[in-house]
């Protein structure tokens, strides 16, 4: 079993014993998403830590988007719950890149690909994405690439 999945199970047990409702509900949701991913496709399989990390990243993104939607709909209590769930998920994700680190990675990718205009964005993204996997939101990366290619 993947180490990250083991850690999620262990932390779920700890949260249940501590009667931490938020953490318990969030970890159950995360483990359900992992299990769903494991049984999707033509045959069931065990996910690697990288794949579990991708599932958690996707679940975190869902929580951020839901919080924004609830804020826009005037439901701050639901938005706060989504943010709280996202903070639980964030405990299992790698630390996010600082803006300066991201800018440096994009600069290196632009130099490596020889990109010179916004038309070359796809080539730059192809180089940058594997380097920032799980450490920077795709929207943040694409914005940085656009800014550097436009300037």
Image (cartoon, rainbow, N blue to C red):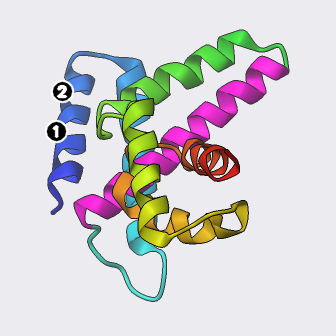
Which SS class for mark 2?
helix
Q: Are marks 1 and 2 in contact (CB under 8 Å)?
A: yes
**Could you tell me which residue is drawn at 60 percent across and 32 percent down?**
64
**Could you tell me which residue is drawn at 42 percent across and 41 percent down?**
102
Q: Position of residue 112 (x, y in %)?
A: 41, 67
> In the picture, residue 119 is in which quadrant?
bottom right
Using the image as rendered, state which of residue 56 and residue 36 is in the foreground.
56
Name the quadrant of the N terminus. bottom left
Using the image as rendered, state which of residue 136 and residue 148 is in the foreground.
148
Q: CA distance from mark 1 to mark 2?
A: 6 Å
Q: Residue furthest bottom?
A: 42
Residue 64 in sight in this render = yes
Q: Is residue 150 left or right of residue 57?
A: right
**Could you tell me which residue is drawn at 38 percent across and 69 percent down?**
38
Q: Residues within 10 Å of mark 2 (few under 14, many from 20)?
A: some
Q: Is residue 15 left or right of residue 30?
A: left
Range drawn in magenta: 48-72
Q: Position of residue 140 (x, y in %)?
A: 57, 41
Q: Position of residue 96 (x, y in %)?
A: 37, 35
Does 29 sit above or below residue 83? Answer: below
Q: Is residue 5 left or right of residue 38?
A: left
Does 148 sit above or below residue 25? Answer: below
Give the main secondary structure, helix, strand or loop, of the magenta stretch.
helix
Name the quadrant of the C terminus. top right
Q: Residues within 10 Å of mark 1 (few under 14, many from 20)?
A: few
Residue 34 in the magenta stretch? The answer is no
Q: Is residue 49 left or right of residue 79?
A: left
- Which residue is label 2 attached to? 14
- Which residue is label 1 attached to? 10
């Amino acid at each position: 079993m993947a180490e990250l999945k083991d850690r999620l199970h262990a932390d779920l047990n700890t949260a249940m014993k501590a009667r931490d409702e938020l953490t318990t509900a969030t970890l159950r949701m995360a483990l359900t998403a992992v299990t769903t991913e494991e049984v999707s496709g033509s045959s069931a399989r065990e996910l690697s830590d990288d794949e579990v990390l991708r599932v958690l990243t996707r679940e975190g993104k869902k929580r951020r988007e839901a919080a924004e939607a609830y804020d826009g709909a005037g439901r701050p209590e639901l938005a706060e719950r989504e943010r709280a769930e996202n903070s639980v998920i964030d405990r299992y994700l790698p630390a996010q890149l600082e803006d300066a680190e991201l800018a440096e990675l994009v600069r290196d990718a632009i130099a490596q690909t020889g990109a010179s205009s916004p038309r070359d964005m796809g080539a730059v993204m192809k180089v940058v994405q594997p380097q920032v996997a799980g450490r920077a939101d795709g929207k943040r990366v694409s914005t940085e690439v656009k800014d550097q290619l436009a300037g």
